[in-house]
Image (cartoon, rainbow, N blue to C red):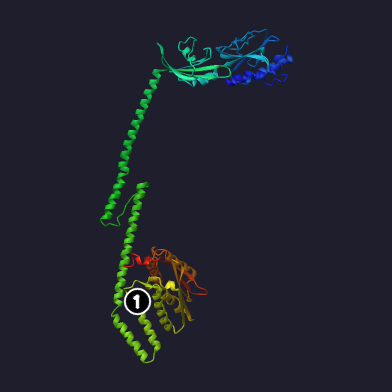
Amino acid sequence: MNRINQASLLIYQDSRNERSLYRIIEKNEIQFADQQDLYVNFQYMVNSLAEIKQVFMYMDNPKLSYRFAYNLPRYTSGQSFKPVFEDGHDIQIESTHMSHNYGVAKFPFEMAEDVITIHRKILNQPTDNILGTLSIDIKLNMIHEISDMLYTPGEEELYLLNTDGSIIYSSEDAPTSEYPWLSPILNEDRQSGHLEYKSEGFAGIHLYQKIKTPLADLTLIKRVPYEYLTKNAKQLTMINSLIVLSFLIVAAIGTIYVSFHFTSPVKQLIRYINKIESGQMDADLDTTRTDEIGILSRRFHQLMQRLNQLINKEYRLELANKTNQLKALQAQVHPHFMNNALQSIGTLALQNNQKKIYSLIAALGKMMRYQMNTNEVLVPLSREIDYVNAYLGLQAQRFDEKLTFFIEAEDEAKEIEVPKMILQPLVENCFKHGFIKQNNVGEVNITAQLIKPDLLSISVEDNGSGLDDKQLEALQFQLDHLYSEGAGSGENRIGLFNVLSRLQLYFNQHTSITLTARQPQGLKVTLLIPVAKGDISQHESIDR
């Protein structure tokens, strides 16, 4: 309706232009050129809205009637058609009717069809003087398309009415203007609502909506019978019943699926746990599932394998400890006898004025007493340094004084308790893999210091033959992967792995051994031991 109103107002468009429709209507006499401009304006007006069938215009001053349809013009003298306007209204909408020629010559090929007509007075602006009238026939195809979407054919009825009750659109084939139910709806003050209505031919609800447009106030009414409403309710009930039944079927299928798909693997996992409880720690769990239960089963199986490995590792450590204790017992064959014998030999050396021999025997005795004492697991670092000092003194005599060694340790570092025999294997490697092939004077330097309040650093370096880059990298990789398969095997440096494993056992897994090449030749071994006050004395592995 807004678009139709805009099309009817095109007569006032560009009113300052001498060739505009409004300027031509103002003229008292129409020339040939004016008629051509009239046809151009009519064509523009018709093409502005696809639903326009024809345009009729009457000009009061020259008293001419023009009709434009099918892109062709016709005109005649006088007023061939006079529209009826309500009092005080400049625009009037004529309800649905058959199109006609407005008293102007017909076209031989024209066909009548249902239209609504917009009648508008042409006013001399800004006065209210009437210059003529304009009538535009609007085809109902667009109104039908919109209205057909608003109701269900065969079940409901739809009506579009003018203010006076005349019907613009009806879903009936032959509507009439005499409906007893129409007057109460038109008299309603509300803009929208519903009214119940019962008669011999209809029982149901009238839904209405009043629409204000620039052309007229329209009322849209839809009649819905109770039978159709209950039919929809029955269909809705049936649909809900089918949905509930479908959910019950799905729930039953889901229950069966859960019983077979989830309960079965859970029972399998329970059987596996029962095997573990019976002592079959190496029991196998075969599952190919990829869902959460499969992941849980595999993770549990991996956990049990890891626990089994840890238990076997503890058994091996316990067995190694027992073996070491047995060897220590075997080594302690009459320790008092050995000490007394060494003391007697030392006394004899002094009597023969062999002080050098006495010092060597005293160093050996000191080493034997330290090594044979199995009651001590942890000792201050200072005692470990004293033991290595005695060991290096004997080695210096062995190499005929072609050995120099230097030991430097901070006082705070000396007070830290460490496992026995962690320095001697490192120093021993210097002689096993370095000085035997040396003809020059050998060097061994040992330093111990706290590089952080909770990090002890001990380094042992020599000027021996050392290792090439490939050997150094391979040995360092084995030390970094101590508990992987093959670590510590196939090499003659078992002492390094023994020291590292014991330190990690007594302290934590962050204890490390780093190997670096010494320039111009030789090897440097660095122990980094994280120590926390109070932790080592409470470690659960000390008693073992």
Instruction: Give 438 or 453, whichever is nearer the viewer.
Output: 453
Q: Quadrant of residue 384?
A: bottom left
Give the crowd class for mark 1: few <14, some 14-19, many >=20 residues within 10 Å: some
Instruction: Give 362 or 492, whichever is nearer the viewer.
Output: 362
Is 368 left or right of 53, judged from the image as shown?
left
Residue 327 appears in the rendering: yes
Taking 308 as reference, is 251 above or below it?
Answer: above
- Image position, residue 64 (x, y; %): 68, 10
Q: Amino acid at mark 1?
A: Gln
- Image position, residue 432 (x, y; %): 42, 76
Query: In the current view of this chain or complex, which residue is farthest to the front?
Result: 189
Point 30% across, 50% down: residue:
269
- Image position, residue 299 (x, y; %): 36, 52
Residue 35 appears in the rendering: no
Taking 215 as reference, is 255 above or below it?
Answer: below
Point 28% across, 50% down: residue:
270
Instruction: Give 245 or 404, whichever is nearer the viewer.
Output: 404
Query: In the current view of this chain or complex, which residue is farthest to the left?
Result: 278
Q: Which residue is mark 1?
A: 371
Is 401 left or right of 276, judged from the image as shown?
right
Is 91 left or right of 478, judged from the image as shown?
right
Q: Quadrant of residue 275?
A: bottom left
Taking 316 as reference, is 55 above or below it?
Answer: above
Is 530 left or right of 74, judged from the image as shown?
left
- Image position, residue 444 (x, y; %): 46, 77
What quarter of the picture does the N terminus occupy?
top right
